[in-house]
Image (cartoon, grey):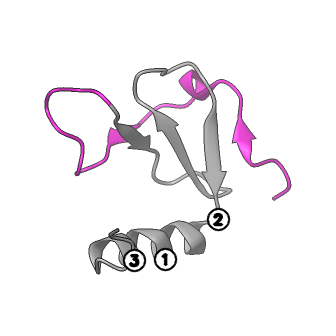
Amino acid sequence: MTERIIHDSGSLHGWRKSSHSGPEGGSCLEVLDGHPHGVPVRDSKNPHGPALLFPAAGWAAFVAAVKDGELSG
């Protein structure tokens, strides 16, 4: 996988908001499960903007670190 940006994330369907996103909107992430080349992540306020594409193992490690509190400041 060399390309790590999906320039028009609106072309993909099935996005879901992060479970940590509040109901008031604001700074929310959306992820797309089941992409064949990794885990796309985008800003929910810009549904046709770019998405970053992370390797699945790297995204899983990041989520686990967040859940374990390893990244709290």
The quarter of the picture where residue 24 lies is: top left
Please give the label number shown on residue 65: 3
The majority secondary structure of the magenta stretch comes to loop
Please give the label number shown on residue 55: 2
Farthest right residue?
2
Circle 2: element type? loop
- Taking the magenta stretch, the answer to whether it contains residue 18 is yes
What residue is drawn where x is 28% and y is 73%? Answer: 67
**Sequence-wise first label, 2 or 3:** 2
What residue is drawn where x is 49% and y is 20%? Answer: 46
Mark pair 2, 3: CA separation: 15 Å
Residue extent of the magenta highlight: 1-26
- Taking the magenta stretch, the answer to whether it contains residue 32 is no
Mark pair 3, 1: CA separation: 6 Å
Residue type at tag 2: Pro
Rendered position, 45 above or below 35 = above
**Residues at badges 3 and 1 in contact (C-beta under 8 Å)?**
yes
Which one is in front in this view, the residue at disc 1 or the one at disc 2?
Answer: 1
- Where does residue 2 sit, x and y in percent of width and height? 86, 55
- Residue bearing mark 1: 61
